């Protein structure tokens, strides 16, 4: 799972614990302490509650920063996929509406990227992998005129790849990849659009064949 997402979940659990445990402790104390020590115990628990609440508030305070960092990763990934799918469509425009072979799709896309991305390894910032995007192997060297539903047919998808010119199908969208972004992994379609899908039933409905 993405480290930032894991950290966000841990912090939210901490807040829940901070709110829940003191309430339980106070309840137990009120049930089991004798009258003689009751006031002393409750007083100590209030002090503990104060300290834990301070820690909890600190966690809540830092959550927006984490949310912003995760959202920035999300935007960068979407920008990357838009740039790569746009470059592939430019290639198709140069080659009689045909996509490049799946063995060198990334190399071909690289030569048609904008100056801000040209020459750089384009990868998802939410992943540890050096290469994170793959071409739908059913579309390699295929004429786009054979794609019956361009807006629903996957062209690029997120994965953990061993090289830049990776290709495959939905089997490559592993559990790790599905947990990469809070709102699900991104897919680029043959019309150039990019969307994320969270639930398995949603990505099972994607078209992988032209
Ligand atoms: Zn991504």
Image (cartoon, rainbow, N blue to C red):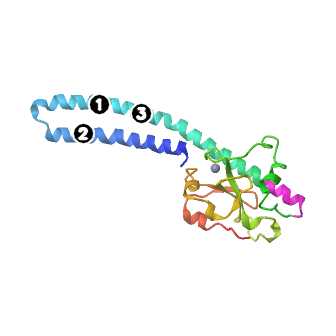
Query: CB of residue at label 3: within 8 Å of ligand 1?
Result: no
**Residue 94 in magenta stretch:** yes
Asked whether, in this view, residue 122 is left or right of residue 53, the answer is right
**In the image, what residue occupies the spot 69% across and 53% down?**
133
* Residue that mark 2 sits on: 25
Q: CA distance from mark 2 to mark 3?
A: 19 Å
How many residues crowd mark 1 within 10 Å: few (<14), some (14–19), many (20+)? few
The region drawn magenta spans 86-96
| Labelled pair 2, 1 in contact (Cβ < 8 Å) | yes
Asked whether, in this view, residue 3 is left or right of residue 85, the answer is left
Q: Quadrant of the C terminus?
A: bottom right
Labelled disc at residue 57: 3
Q: CA distance from mark 1 to mark 3?
A: 14 Å
- Residue sitting nearer the eye, 52 or 108: 108
In primary-sequence order, the first of circles 1 and 3 is 1
**In the image, what residue occupies the spot 79% across and 57% down?**
105
> Measured from the top left, where is residue 151 in percent x and y?
72, 63
Looking at the rendered structure, the secondary structure element under dot 1 is: helix
Looking at the rendered structure, the secondary structure element under dot 3 is: helix
Labelled disc at residue 48: 1
- Residue sitting nearer the eye, 180 or 174: 174
Q: Is residue 6 above or below residue 133?
A: above
């Amino acid at each position: 799972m993405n480290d930032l997402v894991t950290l966000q979940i841990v912090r939210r659990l901490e807040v829940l614990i901070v709110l829940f445990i003191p309430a339980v402790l106070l309840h137990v104390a009120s049930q089991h302490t004798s009258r003689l020590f009751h006031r002393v115990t409750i007083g100590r628990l209030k002090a503990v509650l104060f300290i834990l609440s301070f820690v909890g508030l600190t966690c809540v305070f830092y959550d927006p920063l984490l949310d912003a960092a995760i959202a920035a990763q999300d935007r960068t990934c979407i920008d990357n996929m838009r740039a790569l799918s746009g470059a592939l469509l430019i290639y198709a425009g140069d080659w009689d509406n045909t996509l490049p072979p799946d063995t060198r799709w990334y190399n071909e896309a690289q030569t048609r990227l904008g100056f801000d991305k040209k020459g750089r390894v384009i990868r998802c910032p939410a992943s540890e992998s050096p290469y994170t995007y793959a071409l739908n192997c059913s579309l390699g060297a295929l004429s786009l005129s054979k794609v019956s539903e361009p807006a629903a047919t996957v062209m690029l998808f997120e994965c953990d790849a061993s090289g830049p010119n990776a290709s495959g199908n939905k089997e490559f969208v592993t559990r790790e990849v599905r947990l990469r972004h809070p709102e699900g992994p991104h897919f680029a379609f043959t019309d150039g659009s990019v969307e994320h899908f969270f639930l398995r039933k949603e990505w099972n409905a994607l078209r992988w064949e032209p």
